[in-house]
Amino acid sequence: MNEQEAKVAIVGAGPVGLSAALSLSALGVPSVLLEAKFEPSADLRASTFHPPTLEMLDTLGLAEPLIGRGLITRDWQIRIHETGERAVFDLSLLEADTPFPFRLQCEQSVLCALAMQRAEADDSIDVVRGFRVEGLTQDEAGVTIRAADGRTQRARWVIGSDGARSAVREAAGFAFEGFTYPETTILATTPFAFHEHIVGLSNVNYCWSAHGTFSLLRLPAQWRCSLYADPGESIDDAIRPAAVEAKLQRIVPRADGHEVTGLRPYRIHQRIVETYRNGRVLLAGDAAHLNSPSGGMGMNGGIHDAFALADALSAVLDGGSEALLDRYSRRRKAVAQDQILAQAHRNRTRMQERDDAKRREELARLQAICANPAQARDYLLKSSMIAGLREAERIA
């Protein structure tokens, strides 16, 4: 492996690791980007980009090409499926707060492809594929990372952005406390045009129905449907093609069925590390925090981690105090714990509500917020992750 010590080694070339590498490069800091896989992942993952994320990506020249590949979403809604009653949140209320007053619906893989193209063309970023981290050791001067195939990489600082099953987190001894929700989400992808059959549908919809709950998120060429097993139905039975089709038929009946191009069941976790820093090892993204995808804040929060960490590391490498890295930990943990995890938990709990009276009470409350521009703006500042970033800046 590379015998030369890197200033920064980044483990994981997903949206968080790539954002960190490109941000560091923009600040004049070279890095080595270590990725376990040889080919990019095509899994169904995050698909929503919030306004402040687009602002950050814009500083790297990535917002415009990403927007060109995505679907601009001016509003999103919570609705009762059978009646069509809904609370619609208008993101144009954020026009004074961000140059991107909308959500962008676009696959995570599109950002990764765009960012990787930039990284591979950047002389200050050394992209190394097939480097599967097996362990690491720290000393006062740096970190030695060991790969499963025996290779090593030495670095002054290490960023663990290698996802929910982070090898860096485990090797460096970070505690990762939390819990797993009882339900399993079934993510189905289909080209069926729900917006042509359901009146008033937005591109992002969280839906209560007589059979439980589901969400519909539109992408440029397909829809992502989050479905759940029926009461008493096992996950093995729920993911059978006939069972998935039955659930889609409840949303929009269709004589010739719905084409399903992708299907993935997954469990939802809520976990966070005690600290984002352990010596010369720092965490970002899912390696540091996991939350319900309801509200689309996981990937976005990870990208925000990456930009904040790049700023802090750049300053430290330029002679600044290492206390800046502890401040990074305090700020980003506060945002994750008090904003991202808390909001995602509330969103998940709301949509799992089965009592019709409580659903209608909550819908009425949300409709009242939507009808009041000042209240709606405050709500959107939180749900769009702008308020959390502002609050973090006030943490010393």
Image: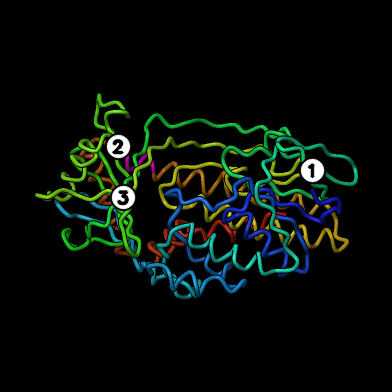
Residue sitting at x 45%, y 52%: 46
Q: Nearer the viewer, residue 111 or 355?
A: 111
Can you identify the residue that label 3 sits on? Answer: 261
Residue that extends furthest to the left in the rendered view of this protein? 255
x, y percent for residue 250? 16, 44
Q: In this rendering, which labeled residue sits more in front, label 2 or label 3?
A: 3
For mark 2, does the 10 Å Cα neighbourhood hold few (<14), some (14 to 19), or many (20 or more) residues?
many
Q: Any magenta on residue 349? A: yes
Q: Quadrant of the C terminus?
A: bottom right
Looking at the image, tell me whether mark 1 or mark 2 is earlier in sequence order: 1
Q: Nearer the viewer, residue 68 or 55?
A: 68
Label 2–label 3 contact, CB within 8 A: no
For mark 1, does the 10 Å Cα neighbourhood hold few (<14), some (14 to 19), or many (20 or more) residues?
some
Residue sitting at x 78%, y 64%: 29
Can you identify the residue that label 1 sits on? Answer: 152
Identity, as a three-letter code, of the amino acid under mark 1? Thr
x, y percent for residue 347? 39, 45
Measure the C-alpha gap from mark 2 to mark 3.
18 Å
Residue that extends furthest to the top in the rendered view of this protein? 232
